[in-house]
């Protein structure tokens, strides 16, 4: 039997170990030692030969035993109320017997602790315990386990419910946020729809404006092309007008240097016959001239006198001159019924010849009026041949002073032709005078 004995930490009763535990090798190894210890510690005993009976004041075995007992006395036992272990302050853990060596005691202590740990199932519970205390401890632990499981279930239930409530609250908040977001998105969608409608209207208006602008552009291009064409035509016309203007300017410069009377009326002579603008005025037996040519010459002469009178601003007093080509005539200012023709038709009556002579004498009267008017000007006119209006005579220049009648009746052709030539000579001098005066102005 082992000399080591344990007491219960709860009720203080000695513990009865199982036979298998006593014979599991613990007792076999410890009995001789225990016997030896008992024999050595008995009072009055005789130690065996070869033994060492000396004992010091404090041996190592005694020190270990004291430490073991002190450790056992400081253990905590389970209480009655709170389910924990309580310990007795007087030292309920009693170690019976003595150890021979420290290592043997430590092995025994470790082995016993492991055994009671297995029995109790808790390393935090002080041991050893008896069977009754162990059963009581197990019942308390079962009760605590049931309560703990109930608390765990309640905690799990409420925790799950709280999680669900929190999740529901979270989901509710998320739902409200989503509803707000949905409402905002709906408003944005409505705004987008309105903007889309407005943009569609603006787009349609822009397209209509684009079409209108395209039409305007096409119309502008047509107008531009038409204006380009007009500009081209106007440029051509302008160039033509400039050319015409340049030509007119050259003509004007040339005409400014040209005597209009000299250019219009050319007076020459062919021997004894005077010529005006290529028409012969007069005739000779050796130089026959048709009356048609003579009449044309008188028409040119009448036109010259009419132009000269207009130039100097002369209004004839007794007659009015009508230059009409080969049918020119004069009309009396005192009697409108009297017309004096400056033409003669061959084969007519003598009365016609008389009127023709009167017309030539009236023409000399008009020429004399022009001479008097021209002599009053700044540059006075001086004719080389004098005119005798009353007699119808032309006086030749020079010292001889021969007179030639301008009438055809009772006159020779040579005399008449000479008188006409002297008359054209006066007109030629008049052209020179009027040209000089015109150039001065």
Image (cartoon, grey):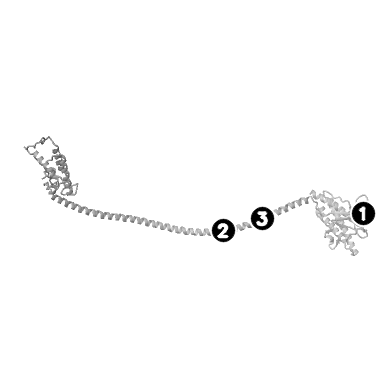
Q: Give the secondary structure at mark 2.
A: helix
- Position of residue 77 measured from the top left corner of the image (x, y, whole percent): 16, 46
Lower sequence index among marks 1 and 3? 3
Residue shown at 31% from the left, 55% from the top: 167
For the residue labelled by badge 3, is the local secondary structure a helix, a strand or a loop?
A: helix
Q: Does residue 203 show up?
A: yes
Q: Is residue 209 left or right of residue 139?
A: right
Reading the image, the residue beneath label 1 is: 403
Quadrant showing the N terminus:
top left
Label 1 sits on a secondary structure element that is strand
Instruction: Name the residue: 60% across, 57% down.
Output: 221
Q: Does residue 100 appear left or right of residue 271 in this picture? A: left
Tell me the residue that label 2 is attached to.
214
Separation of residues labelled 2 and 3 (CA atoms): 26 Å
Name above or below for residue 379 compared with residue 417. Answer: above
Residue indicated by mark 3? 232
- Is 286 or 345 nearer to us in this picture? 286
Counting residues from the N terminus, which is met first, the one under dot 1 or under dot 2? 2
């Amino acid at each position: 039997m082992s000399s080591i004995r344990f007491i219960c930490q709860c009720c203080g009763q000695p513990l009865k170990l199982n036979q298998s535990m006593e014979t599991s090798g613990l007792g076999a190894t410890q009995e001789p030692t225990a016997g030896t210890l008992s024999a050595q510690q008995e009072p009055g005993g005789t130690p065996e030969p070869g033994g060492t009976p000396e004992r010091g004041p404090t041996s190592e075995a005694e020190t270990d035993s004291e430490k073991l007992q002190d450790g056992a006395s400081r253990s905590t036992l389970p209480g009655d109320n709170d389910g924990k272990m309580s310990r007795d302050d007087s030292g309920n853990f009693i170690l019976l017997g003595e150890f021979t060596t420290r290592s043997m005691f430590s092995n025994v202590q470790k082995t016993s602790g492991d055994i009671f740990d297995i029995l109790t199932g808790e390393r935090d519970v002080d041991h050893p315990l008896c069977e009754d205390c162990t059963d009581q401890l197990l019942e308390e632990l079962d009760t605590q386990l049931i309560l703990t499981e109930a608390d765990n279930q309640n905690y799990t239930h409420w925790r799950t419910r709280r999680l669900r409530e929190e999740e529901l609250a979270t989901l509710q908040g998320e739902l409200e946020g989503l509803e707000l977001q949905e409402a905002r998105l709906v408003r944005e969608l409505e705004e987008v729809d309105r903007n889309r409608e407005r943009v569609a209207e603006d787009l349609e208006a822009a397209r209509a404006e684009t079409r209108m602008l395209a039409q305007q552009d096409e119309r502008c291009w047509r107008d531009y092309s038409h204006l380009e064409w007009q500009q081209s035509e106007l440029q051509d016309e302008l160039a033509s007008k400039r050319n015409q203007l340049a030509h007119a300017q050259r003509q004007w410069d040339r005409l400014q240097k040209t005597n209009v009377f000299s250019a219009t009326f050319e007076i020459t002579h062919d021997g004894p016959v005077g010529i005006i603008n290529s028409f012969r005025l007069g005739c000779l037996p050796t130089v026959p001239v048709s009356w048609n040519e003579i009449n044309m010459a008188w028409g040119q002469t009448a036109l010259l006198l009419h132009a000269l009178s207009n130039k100097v601003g002369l209004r004839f007093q007794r007659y009015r001159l009508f230059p009409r080509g080969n049918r020119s005539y004069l009309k009396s200012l005192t009697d409108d019924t009297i017309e004096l023709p400056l033409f003669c038709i061959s084969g007519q009556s003598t009365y016609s010849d008389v009127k023709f002579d009167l017309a030539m004498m009236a023409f000399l009267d008009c020429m004399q009026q022009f001479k008097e008017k021209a002599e009053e000007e700044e540059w006075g006119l001086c004719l080389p041949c004098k005119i005798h209006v009353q007699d119808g005579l032309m006086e030749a220049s020079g010292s001889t002073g021969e007179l030639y009648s301008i009438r055809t009746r009772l006159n020779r052709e040579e005399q008449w032709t000479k008188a006409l030539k002297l008359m054209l000579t006066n007109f030629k001098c008049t052209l020179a005078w009027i040209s000089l005066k015109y150039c001065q102005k």
